């Protein structure tokens, strides 16, 4: 039986290694199925590649192009070997392309259509993936129907199959979250970040209508032009078999240096030992929300730190806008009002971090998402103007 696979084929709104950017708003795909090719030797473009798999499902969402499908039969074993060794990855093939040059002389692809992908040693994006699912176990003959001279051969086959099935059994027991935990939540009001006894995580990490105390006037969180693609740099497998782009909440390293660029800041938060939750991020009328789950493999002490401490978002300037790139626990009292530190460079705001408290849940999802009167703050025109000015500012005096 052909092996199945899942993949993150491309990142949207994020520069490739050679400086190209795929606009999240301009994408589509050809009719499925689509080819997945393999390039054995590096050639110009994707020349010399052969088709080794079929793409049966594809999704363009949350700043990523993700897909699933099956490998073809009778492909070179070297393809499987390189995939399992992690030395090749997908490079998306696009057609129907239109592009412009931005202020930094980078190519921004404003219209595009997915026509397939090619497995190459050096993908255009460093944080893509192509994951093979476990190989199906082979069916074994009924021992009662096997002649006596053949029994020894059968016994050896059973032992070999048992060796292969052991990791499959462990994989089958893998704990995965329900898909609805990663669906867009519906909040009636601003909701503190909440952790349920079952491990579900949801709530707001930054409210639109709260002023940060670290800047003059009323400064509120920026919206993400890329759909939080700079935060969704990982992925999460769900109980229904699908895969969603996701970001990680951490309880270990404190905020990255405010003078650091976004890539250095992202690396600062990339500590598996400190990861406590995997979530998706989005926006509603109340603010920036996250939804997901507490990782089962998270260190107990990290989880306790996460539950008892407020969280703080980290925004960095990417291109012409501030983007959320990390959320971590901080040693600040858990007030439901953000507090901010801001860094400037050459007259332009480059970074912001703001703390927001966590509320443990003791009841149902409906109880936790019921409006909290203490958090309802009247939104004013001054705050709206400040939010817009902050998101667009590049050379304003401070």
Image: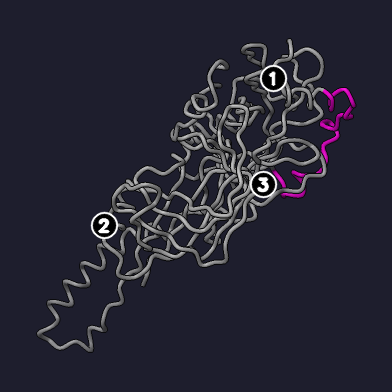
Between 147 and 257, the one nearer to me in the picture: 257
**Which colouring convention does the figure follow?**
one colour
**Marks 2 and 1: in contact by CB < 8 Å?**
no
Q: Position of residue 7 (x, y in %)?
A: 47, 53
Q: Which mark is residue 25?
A: 3
Q: Is residue 279 visible?
A: no
Spatial CA distance of label 2 from label 3 is: 37 Å
Q: Is residue 363 magenta?
A: yes
Q: Position of residue 274 (x, y in %)?
A: 48, 32
Q: Position of residue 97 (x, y in %)?
A: 58, 50
Spatial CA distance of label 1 from label 2 is: 50 Å
| Residue neighbourhood size for the residue with mark 2, other residues' Cα within 10 Å, grouped as few (<14), some (14–19), many (≥20) | few
| Residue neighbourhood size for the residue with mark 1, other residues' Cα within 10 Å, grouped as few (<14), some (14–19), many (≥20) | some
What quarter of the picture does the N terminus occupy? bottom left
Q: Which mark is residue 394?
A: 1
What quarter of the picture does the C terminus occupy? top right
- Above or below, 124 against 330 in this view is below
**Marks 1 and 3: in contact by CB < 8 Å?**
no
Q: Position of residue 25 (x, y in %)?
A: 67, 46
Within the image, what quadrant is residue 172 found in?
Answer: bottom left
Residue that mark 2 sits on: 78
For the record, the magenta segment spans 362-385
């Amino acid at each position: 039986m052909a092996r199945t696979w899942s993949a993150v084929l491309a990142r949207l709104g994020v520069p490739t290694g050679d400086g190209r950017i795929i606009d999240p708003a301009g994408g589509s795909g050809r009719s499925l199925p689509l080819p997945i090719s393999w390039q054995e030797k590096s050639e110009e473009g994707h020349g010399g590649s052969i088709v080794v798999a079929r793409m049966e499902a594809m999704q363009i969402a949350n700043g990523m192009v993700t897909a699933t499908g099956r490998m073809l039969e009778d492909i070179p074993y070297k393809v499987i070997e390189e995939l399992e060794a992690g030395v090749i990855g997908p490079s998306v093939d696009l057609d129907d392309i239109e592009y412009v040059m931005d202020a930094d002389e980078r190519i921004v692809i404003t219209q595009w259509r997915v026509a397939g992908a090619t497995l190459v040693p050096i993908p255009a994006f460093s944080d893509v993936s192509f994951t093979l699912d476990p190989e199906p176990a082979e069916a074994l003959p009924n021992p009662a129907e096997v002649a006596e001279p053949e029994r020894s051969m059968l016994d050896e086959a059973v032992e070999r199959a048992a060796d292969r099935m052991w990791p499959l059994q462990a994989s089958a027991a893998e704990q995965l979250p329900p898909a609805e935990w990663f669906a867009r939540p519906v909040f009636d009001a601003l909701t503190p970040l909440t952790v349920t006894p079952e491990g579900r995580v949801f709530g707001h990490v930054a409210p639109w209508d709260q002023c940060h105390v670290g800047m003059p006037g009323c400064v509120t969180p920026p919206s993400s032009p890329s759909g939080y693609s700079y935060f969704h740099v990982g992925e999460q497998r769900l109980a229904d078999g699908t895969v969603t782009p996701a970001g990680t909440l951490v309880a270990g390293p404190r905020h990255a240096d405010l003078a650091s660029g976004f890539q250095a800041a992202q690396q600062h938060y990339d500590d598996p030992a400190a990861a406590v939750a995997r979530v998706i991020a989005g926006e509603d009328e109340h603010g920036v929300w996250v939804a997901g789950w507490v990782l089962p493999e998270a260190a107990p002490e990290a989880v306790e730190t996460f539950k008892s401490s407020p969280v703080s978002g980290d925004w960095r300037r990417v291109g012409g806008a501030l983007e959320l790139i990390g959320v971590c626990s901080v040693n600040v009292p858990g007030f439901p009002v953000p507090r901010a530190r801001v860094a400037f460079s050459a007259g332009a705001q480059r970074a912001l971090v703001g703390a927001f408290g966590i509320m443990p849940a003791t009841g149902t999802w409906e109880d936790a998402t019921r409006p909290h009167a203490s958090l309802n703050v009247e939104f004013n025109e001054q705050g709206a103007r400040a939010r817009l000015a902050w998101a667009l500012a590049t050379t304003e005096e401070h």
